[in-house]
Image (tube, rainbow, N blue to C red):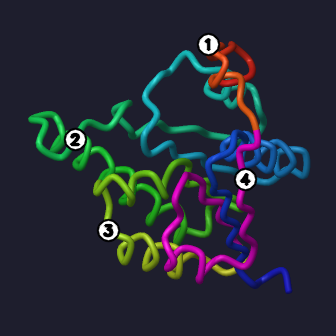
Amino acid sequence: MKDKKRILLFTGDGKGKTTAALGTALRASGHGMKTLVIQFVKADPTTGEVAACRHLPGCEIVQTGRGFVPDRTDPAFPEHVMAAAEGLKLAAQALSSGGYDLVVLDEICTAIGKGLLDEGQVIEAVRKGAPGICVVMTGRNATAGLISIADTVTDMRMVKHGFQEGREGQEGVEY
């Protein structure tokens, strides 16, 4: 069974998708596994996860995103599309190389939903992943195609969030 690929998907409108993926990376590191985290939308190098991955054995994190994704009519939108395409190219290489045990595609669902990436190309890259690799995908509004290729799907539903009460993002909790 270990040679069979695992595909996990963390989606939904609730908090914790990236947190769950990073928890998986933490667990993998504890077992001496090599991990690559690719962040498709995020672009802040000062977040806690970037700092932590620098110190986590076997874990590498790459931010290919450009931050908040503007409307498709915005002149900056093509830059976001190109950045996501570079991220997908990196992901496809990492997935098929056999050099990683775990590859996290953080906010890949968001990148597809915002029109930065084509769902079919993402599915193809994941399907071509090396035997035994574990792939974790995150983001709101997972597409039917991503849900269908995943063997484990968790929908994180928001019941209540501090942002609704006007709380700001907290260091160590939201970033």
Q: CA distance from mark 1 to mark 4?
A: 20 Å
Q: Quadrant of the C terminus?
A: top right
Residue 175 visible in the displayed image: no
Numbered range of the magenta stretch: 133-159
Separation of disc 4 and disc 3 at Cα? 24 Å
Q: Earlier in the sequence, mark 2 or mark 1?
A: 2
Residue 77 in magenta stretch: no
Q: Residue at x 87, y 48 (%)?
A: 27
**Amino acid type at image mark 3:** Asp
Q: Secondary structure at mark 3?
A: loop
Asked if residue 38 lies left or right of residue 31, the reply is: left
Circle on res. 156:
4
Give the amino acid type for the residue marked by disc 4 in the picture.
Met
Q: Which of the two labelled residues, at mark 3 and mark 2, occupies the earlier sequence position? A: 2
Query: Residue tagged by mark 2?
Result: 71
For residue 141: magenta?
Answer: yes
135 shown above or below 6: above
Q: Would residue 76 be found to the left or right of residue 51 on screen?
A: left
Residue at mark 1 = 168
Dot 1: few (<14), some (14–19), or many (≥20) neighbours within 10 Å?
few
Tell me which amino acid carries mark 2.
Answer: Asp
Q: How many marks?
A: 4
Examine the image and state in which quarter residue 54 appears: top right
Q: Nearer the viewer, mark 3 or mark 1?
A: 1
CA gap between label 2 and label 1 equals 24 Å
Q: Which residue is mark 3?
A: 118
